[in-house]
Amino acid sequence: MNTPTLRDLGEDALVARLIQDLPLSGDVIAGAGDDCAVLESPDPDRYELLKTDCVVEGVHFFPGTPGESVGWKALCRAVSDIAAMGGVPRAALVTLVAPPDRPVTEIEAWFRGLAKAAREYGVSVVGGETSAPAPGSDSAMLSITLTGWVEKDRCVFRHGARPGDEIFVTGVLGGTLSGHHLHFRPRLEEARWLVHEHRPVAMMDLSDGLARDLRRLALAGGVGFRIETGSLPCRDGSSVAEALGDGEDYELLFCLPAEEGDVLLAAWSEKFPGVSLSRIGRVTTADEGFHFLDVEGECARIPEGWGHFSH
Amino acid sequence: MNTPTLRDLGEDALVARLIQDLPLSGDVIAGAGDDCAVLESPDPDRYELLKTDCVVEGVHFFPGTPGESVGWKALCRAVSDIAAMGGVPRAALVTLVAPPDRPVTEIEAWFRGLAKAAREYGVSVVGGETSAPAPGSDSAMLSITLTGWVEKDRCVFRHGARPGDEIFVTGVLGGTLSGHHLHFRPRLEEARWLVHEHRPVAMMDLSDGLARDLRRLALAGGVGFRIETGSLPCRDGSSVAEALGDGEDYELLFCLPAEEGDVLLAAWSEKFPGVSLSRIGRVTTADEGFHFLDVEGECARIPEGWGHFSH
């Protein structure tokens, strides 16, 4: 019998298996499985947020990517996760793994991009680490840990969606490799406004594509969904399949009770005229499953293991 | 003119160059350059501590290392840094980078070791991330971020040494590749006792070898030192050069006003009979430089760029 590999198991199942025996104390509100870890804070009105995220050369960016974009992307991915909880970022640690023969100027460019993003989003870069990769490996990576905070009564988890809620997404989706994935602006201001003015019941940021991430949100809440693919905000030139599957959108996906949807859409377009907000479907019961309806109203059930989105 | 590489610059100079333009806000007490980052906390009596640290296969451990030891080492390295500030660890994030064809059982063993260390030192593992390495790379790594806290009036930085202070080191040094580097116990209990009972004026943990780390402590405080190499606690079978240079000792290096040394040594041997504590030398003025005296009293000045300890 062959020993199963990480590829056989897949990322979500691997994480589920690895975390089952890890210790958690009572002051941990949410551990692995949401956009951030959520912990009690010495401030009784707030939670602490913790997030770690890495970009690997050859996986999340490619040799030849402008260095400032590498640093910008690395930090902004983590800021997007803090935003997805409704929170505010605070302090970052940076781990750099780079081959010894890499030019200093290249790594300095990474850090310029990082510093630019840190200033933009109010983040202090407080430390980190450097290491060489394994001998013979020429790949570099940048790993970011970001702390933040959120008012307890504004914190939004993934698991709060209920049947009947409407599903919204900010911005446009798909085609991110044309440049968006390097230059995106995390929806920090938008998320802070949302949690103060409209209180989404569930929220996450889109990093692995709507089809995959929405399924995670639905599984977290024990619900199903019906998405009208004709309502999807596809980036210019992108197909519905690309909007569902490309990933790296770094937009907000959230759910709101149906009676509040119209009010939200009106207020949003006034507050953020440059950022689209789309109502793309509705939360259903888990029994109804996961559905994407095409423009003819045909209904396609997305199977759990749909190869295009599996690892 | 060739563009300088990371190897040309070396780790310490690289870090110094990279951090110079990174933003820091006023609530950051200590950023890069100490064992941990130190931040203001909502609790006015405490600081928050943040540390990130990674182990790379082929650099910090080798293929064939028992999996549980990899996880144990990864977390305990960070615990050792929290201890070196006088603090208490709290919550960890784990980043796993591993090739897709790696057996699941191997990674599970890493996490068993991690969980064991987490339970031992009261750490909650609250989240993390997984990624594949660059295509073609077969190297795995584990990166840990650890949060902690310390009472403000007990926090010990690297920079507090003053001429005349005595220099101490816990445990024995050198020869760590024979096994110690995989199984060490971070000096958490010892450090907490020290900061409550004897208040070291400067402290750090030994990860890169006494010669290199002591130099960092001296540079941080703007002081020099004289070490009597005959007083060095060499591990059985290790030479003075190995005790100075091998690294991965994870012992505490600290300074105390000279008049308190005898009291400390007596109290220590009563409190921690199984752990040695050695008085190895004295802090001097920066003008006096960095000196290691051999048993004949001969004095060898260790130059800044001594190749054996440089990258």
Image (tube, coloured by chain):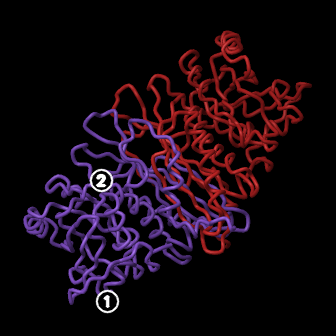
Chain colours: A red, B purple
Residue situated in front as seen by the camera: B268 or B232: B232
- In the image: residue A118, left or right of residue A302: left
Q: Which residue is painted at 54% across and 53% down in the image?
A: B18
When the figure is inspected, residue A209 is found, relative to residue B310, above or below; the finding is above
Query: Residue B127 at x, y = what percent?
Result: 50, 47
Query: Residue A76 at x, y = what percent?
Result: 62, 40
Specify which label sits upstream in the sequence, 2 or 1: 2
Q: Is residue B91 visible?
A: no
Mark 1 lies on a secondary structure that is: loop
When the figure is inspected, residue B237 is found, relative to residue B132, above or below; the finding is below
Q: Residue furthest right?
A: A296
Q: Which mark is residue B72?
A: none
Q: Which residue position holds label 1?
A: B237
Query: Residue A86 at x, y = what percent?
Result: 54, 28
Q: Which residue position holds label 2?
A: B157
Q: Which residue is painted at 72% across and 16% down in the image?
A: A273
Q: Which residue is painted at 19% across and 71% down in the image?
A: B277
